[in-house]
Image (cartoon, coloured by chain):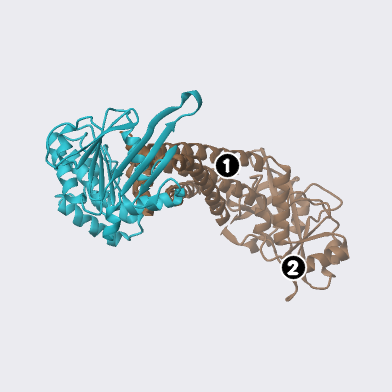
Chain colours: A brown, B cyan
């Protein structure tokens, strides 16, 4: 009977496409908006993700997220190094600096000061120059998106000068870095250099990056560091989660995107539900004929559910495909964040399943109560 | 079927009433109908519109419950039967031919004809050849894969006849089978029904307004105002409208 249901469904081409459009529209909205939301959330943690190699981040106990920097005394580095199980620990400066460009204009930049000896946290993907170029006096490396923002349509010019805190900084390389939430250019330099570029403060250490010794779990060592130093030590994954949770709970981002996703769900349900309902009503006579010939309500229910699931799967495929196409088409557009993890597909799939379930529930009652004697009415 | 079973009426209707609506707005469609139909008979139900013909065949077919009275079809009490049992009864025992054909427009001729077999649980691989063989006997062997919209009215009605007979039902209900057809196609349709459907173990009930098909009847029951007012026995081929003697 399922193939009869399928043929009934696709036999009415206009209605079929209408229902698929409704579901696909909802899937597109939900998948696209969820992916942009995920993209934005990924931006908030991009600087944690960019720091490869360190399993543990140590910071002031009051820090709420990665951009909420509360400077610590440099001596905390040695306290962390003294905790059993720590393989190594290095400093990381992170702050916002004001850069003066050649023309006299000012731009805010994210300033990252890397450990002078190891360059832990340095960008892995250099486009121009080498990370070792940071050893030169006043040397900085800028992320390519930031460079293009400051000097659009200009090729990279090694040795270009900017000023921070009245000190000259020489751009010696370009790196690829993840986009940041603030969309400021990212400037990498040595820790000792960074503290000179930053406004003078009594304490300047932003984070201590640490790595557990072989065989020591990051979460276990983080707990030990917190216990012994009184600092907040988090595994990389926990710091990612804490940062994302902060943005979820303290900004309007999830509400705004939630409203759009919710509207997509409602509009999709309305379009798909109404069209599916009309499709069922138009086919009541056919269902009546099937019932007269001995088709039970259970089989009718299966037929309607099969029809609903069919349009659900096709609509989901079309909608998610269009959303992915959107993400692919805008991948070079640096201002837009688009990240479609598998969870987005699952969420969209569940939403589409609910949409087609609601649409079929609206309709199924009409089929159940249809009198098989309807077929005798001319 | 044992011959003793063929002696008793295939269809027994006793004091059947059917009301529609409730309270002051109640409309009585059937007012105590009694009717026996023996095996092997082609009975025609005739009468003016609204006299209760369709209501009566709906009840005999098990698609409508009476308000009162008893209905026995092939020894089974349709009134006390559960809804699920009535569905099973229809699936196994009843074939329908409708005035407006009621073919599924998205299915081809052979798929439409195979629907009762599919409902009965046959696989498509078994059902389609069986339906195709019957359509071939009905002269539609070359139109198996045509959609209903690609067939003439007469051809559609032949597909409907195939659909009604493909699962070998014992009760065939025909509701105005010729009213949407021209005279020639109406004649062909009745030839096919009387030729293929009428058998000793089967009952055929034809609801009709079309006097041209009366010669195919074994008996003609005339209804008026929810009651059977006359039943006239005929010899097949006899021409003329039924008299109104009870």
Q: Chain of mark 1?
A: A
- Residue B152 visible in the displayed image: no
Furthest-front residue in this view: B246
Taking the image as shown, residue A226 lies to the left or right of residue B214, namely: right
**Quarter of the image where one finds residue B187:** top left
Considering only vertical position in the picture, is A241 above or below B13? Answer: below
What residue sits 58% from the left and 49% below the top? A145
Q: Position of residue B81 (x, y in %)?
A: 44, 49
What residue sits 65% from the left and 53% below the top? A46
Q: Earlier in the sequence, mark 1 or mark 2?
A: 2
Q: Secondary structure at mark 1?
A: helix
Q: Position of residue A358 (x, y in %)?
A: 52, 43
Please name the residue that numbered disc 1 is placed on: A261
Q: Nearer the viewer, mark 1 or mark 2?
A: 1
Cα separation between marks 1 and 2: 36 Å
Q: Secondary structure at mark 2?
A: helix
Please name the residue that numbered disc 2 is placed on: A218
- Residue A100 visible in the displayed image: yes
Taking the image as shown, residue B116 lies to the left or right of residue A83, namely: left
Q: Position of residue A189 (x, y in %)?
A: 70, 56
Considering only vertical position in the picture, is B88 above or below B243? Answer: below
**How many numbered tags mark residues here?**
2
Q: Quadrant of the C terminus of chain A?
A: top left
Q: Position of residue A194 (x, y in %)?
A: 75, 54
- Please tell me which residue lies in front, B13 or A192: B13
Q: Residues within 10 Å of mark 1 (few under 14, many from 20)?
A: many
Q: Residues within 10 Å of mark 2 (few under 14, many from 20)?
A: many
Q: Verify CB contact (< 8 Å) between mark 1 and mark 2.
A: no
């Amino acid at each position: 009977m399922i193939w009869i249901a399928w043929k009934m469904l696709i036999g009415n081409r206009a209605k079929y496409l209408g229902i698929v459009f409704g579901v696909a529209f909802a899937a597109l909205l939900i998948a696209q908006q969820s992916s942009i939301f995920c993209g934005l959330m990924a931006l908030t943690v991009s600087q944690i993700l960019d720091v490869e190699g360190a399993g543990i981040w140590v910071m002031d106990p009051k820090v709420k997220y990665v951009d909420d920097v509360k400077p610590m005394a440099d001596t905390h580095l040695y306290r962390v190094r003294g905790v059993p199980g720590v393989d190594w620990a290095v400093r990381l400066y992170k702050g916002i600096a004001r850069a003066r460009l050649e023309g006299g204009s000012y731009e805010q930049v994210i300033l990252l000061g890397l450990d002078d000896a190891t360059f832990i946290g340095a960008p892995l993907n250099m486009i121009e120059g080498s990370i070792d170029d940071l050893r030169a006096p006043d040397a900085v490396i800028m992320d390519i998106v930031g460079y293009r923002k400051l000097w659009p349509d200009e090729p990279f010019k090694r040795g270009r000068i900017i000023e921070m805190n009245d000190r000259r900084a020489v751009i010696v390389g370009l790196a690829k870095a993840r986009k940041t939430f603030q969309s400021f250019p990212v400037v990498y330099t040595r820790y000792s250099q960074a503290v000179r570029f930053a406004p003078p403060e009594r304490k300047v250490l932003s984070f201590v990056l640490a790595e557990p010794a072989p065989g020591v779990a990051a979460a276990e060592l983080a707990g030990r560091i917190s216990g012994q130093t009184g600092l907040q030590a988090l595994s990389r994954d926990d710091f990612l989660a804490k940062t994302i949770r902060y943005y979820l709970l303290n900004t309007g981002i999830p509400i705004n995107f939630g409203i759009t996703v919710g509207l997509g769900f409602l509009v999709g349900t309305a379009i798909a539900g109404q069209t599916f309902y009309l499709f069922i009503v138009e086919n009541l006579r056919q269902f009546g004929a099937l019932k007269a010939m001995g088709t039970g309500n259970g089989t009718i229910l299966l037929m309607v559910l099969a029809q609903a699931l069919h349009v659900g799967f096709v609509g989901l495929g079309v909608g998610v495909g269009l959303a992915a196409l959107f993400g692919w088409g805008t991948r070079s557009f640096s201002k837009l964040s688009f990240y479609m993890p598998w969870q987005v597909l699952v969420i969209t799939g569940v939403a589409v399943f609910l949409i087609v379930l609601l649409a079929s529930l609206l309709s199924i009652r009409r089929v159940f109560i249809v009198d098989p004697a309807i077929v005798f009415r001319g | 079927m044992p011959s003793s079973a063929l002696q008793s009426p295939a269809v027994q209707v006793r004091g059947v009433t059917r009301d529609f609506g409730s309270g002051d707005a109640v409309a009585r469609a059937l007012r105590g109908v009694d009717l026996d139909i023996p095996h092997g008979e082609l009975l025609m139900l005739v009468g003016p519109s609204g006299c209760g013909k369709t209501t009566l065949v709906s009840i005999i077919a098990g698609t409508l419950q009476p308000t009162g009275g008893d209905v026995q079809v092939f020894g089974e009490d349709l009134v006390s039967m559960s809804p699920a049992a009535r569905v099973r009864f229809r699936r196994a025992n009843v074939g329908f031919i409708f005035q407006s054909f009621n073919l599924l427009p998205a299915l081809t001729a052979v798929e439409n004809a195979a629907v009762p077999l599919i409902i009965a649980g046959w696989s498509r691989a078994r059902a389609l050849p069986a339906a195709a063989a019957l359509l071939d006997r009905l002269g539609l062997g070359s139109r198996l894969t045509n959609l209903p919209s690609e067939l003439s009215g007469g051809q559609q009605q032949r597909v409907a006849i195939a659909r009604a007979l493909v699962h070998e039902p014992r009760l065939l209900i025909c509701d105005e089978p010729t009213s949407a057809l021209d005279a020639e196609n109406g004649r062909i349709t009745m030839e096919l029904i009387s030729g293929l459907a009428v058998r000793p173990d089967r009952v055929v009930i034809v609801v009709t307004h079309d006097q041209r098909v009366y010669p195919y009847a074994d008996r003609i029951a005339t209804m008026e105002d929810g009651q059977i007012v006359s039943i006239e026995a005929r010899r097949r081929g006899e021409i003329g409208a039924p008299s109104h003697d009870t």
